[in-house]
Image (tube, coloured by chain):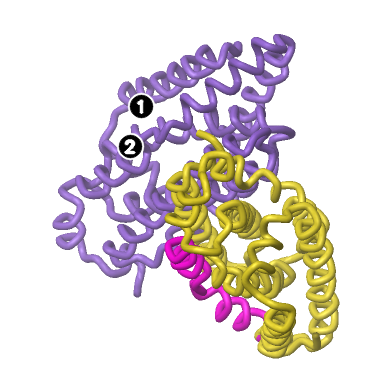
Chain colours: A yellow, B purple
């Protein structure tokens, strides 16, 4: 199996992706998201160990298993595009692993904030980028990004904890800011290394649209922090 | 929802479980196995971090996700029996967590040996015990115990590593013995605490049959060690 960029002449690319959609960019987005789901799976399943009750452990395990299902769907789509999933994911292993290595949650609440705030930013970003994909890939990306109840679960548990112990909110707000900082650092590295993703977006969006996109992502982050009762 | 033991008069118990099957023992077995699957899921997903390649990581994640599916099936069966799954699992949380806390794999190969040797003993034990359950529970237990390719995967990777680096075999053999020792320690604790499981078996099997059962489990363990090329 060869990479899509090597395999497809322009006419094929246009047929499978629609005019104006660079297949290398599509593969980059799907590869990044696939590894994101696989590492979210790993991380949530690992954090299940910290759950204070069996019901919470079972709930986070269920979310982790759903992320694994999404990972499989994205791998299937990559194979349909003639790409070996591992090859498409490879460029994202190091930045995502570095992000997770630098932000190990110290306890269950930090883990929930990471799931909600960290994954939230990722979700918003991929949802925006999905607008620039071919229709089949776009539908799949939007499907795997659907909220599976993580948000309500995290908000419920964090609000209960901070209302019982208000000083916690300060620590968790700092934690969320650290997550944001590390996520942006890794995202910048990816943007520098992976031209195809940048080209995919910039070939279809002008600077104003890009500015609006980042504004929407920022606003949604601030909205999530408000839902948690934390200052952003 | 009340516990099955509190809810069911004898006639009900006989109707749902067949004559001679103590429903409290069935619930104990299903609860132990359910928590075993949940913690196997957690552990395998955690160990995925140590996988040397993306393909290996994806393979172990797939096995972990399958364990989660089994966990869900066992919880559904417990609910069908009128039992809250968390209540049935609770007595096994501490012994299983202690086992896993005392045996953290130091690397990917130790993790694979733990999956193969540790889960293998558990599987053999539950397969033996399944003979003493009501038919529906027995079928479910045998279904969730089916090998999903873990054995071949672990054997393949361990043999490749020890043939490239023979001294490794000594360390891994010691590791397997430590796993066995800790597993037996925790199993003894469970046997002392959970009379219903012991009663379930001893009401249906005589001492000769019990001796044969433990002999079969030991032989299968030795067979697995031979497959790995390790001395038991």
Residue B36 visible (yes or no) = no
Please name the residue shown 32% across and 65% down the image: B79
The image quarter containing residue A187 is bottom right
Q: Which residues are magenta?
A: A134-159
The subunit letter for the residue under badge 2 reads B
Please name the residue shown 70% across and 47% down the image: A91
Would you say the residues marked 1 and 2 are in contact, meaning their CB atoms lie under 8 Å apart? yes
| Labels 1 and 2 in the same subunit | yes
The subunit letter for the residue under badge 1 reads B
Residue A199 visible (yes or no) = yes
> As drawn, is A57 to the left or to the right of A228?
left
For label 2, the crowd category at 10 Å Cα-Cα, with few meaning under 14, some 14 to 19 and many 20 or more, is: some
Depth check: give the residue in front, A38 or B27.
A38
> As drawn, is A184 to the left or to the right of B218?
right
Query: Mark 1 sits on what residue?
Result: B210
Q: On screen, B7 above or below A172?
A: above
Query: Mark 2 sits on what residue?
Result: B202
Residue A146 among those drawn in magenta: yes
Depth check: give the residue in front, A79 or A48.
A79
Residue B81 among those drawn in magenta: no
């Amino acid at each position: 199996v060869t990479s899509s960029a090597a395999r497809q002449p322009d006419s094929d690319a246009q047929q499978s992706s629609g005019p104006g959609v660079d297949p290398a960019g599509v593969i980059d987005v799907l590869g990044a998201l696939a590894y994101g789901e696989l590492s979210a799976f790993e991380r949530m399943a690992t954090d299940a160990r910290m759950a204070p009750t069996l019901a919470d452990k079972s709930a986070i395990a269920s979310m982790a298993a759903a992320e694994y299902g999404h990972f499989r769907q994205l791998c299937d789509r990559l194979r349909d595009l003639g790409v070996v999933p591992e090859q498409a994911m490879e460029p994202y292993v190091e930045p995502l692993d570095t992000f997770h290595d630098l932000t190990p949650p110290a306890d269950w609440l930090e883990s929930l904030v990471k799931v909600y705030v960290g994954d939230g930013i990722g979700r918003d970003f991929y949802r925006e980028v999905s607008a620039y994909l071919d229709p089949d890939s776009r539908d799949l990306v939007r499907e795997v990004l659907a909220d599976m109840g993580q948000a309500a679960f995290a908000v419920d548990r964090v609000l209960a904890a901070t209302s019982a112990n208000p000083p916690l909110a300060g620590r968790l707000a700092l934690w969320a800011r650290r997550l944001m900082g590390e996520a942006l650092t890794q995202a910048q590295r990816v943007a520098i290394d992976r031209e195809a993703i940048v080209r995919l977006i910039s070939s279809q969006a002008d600077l104003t649209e890009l500015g609006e996109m980042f504004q929407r992502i920022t606003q949604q982050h601030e909205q999530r922090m408000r839902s948690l009762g934390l200052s952003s």
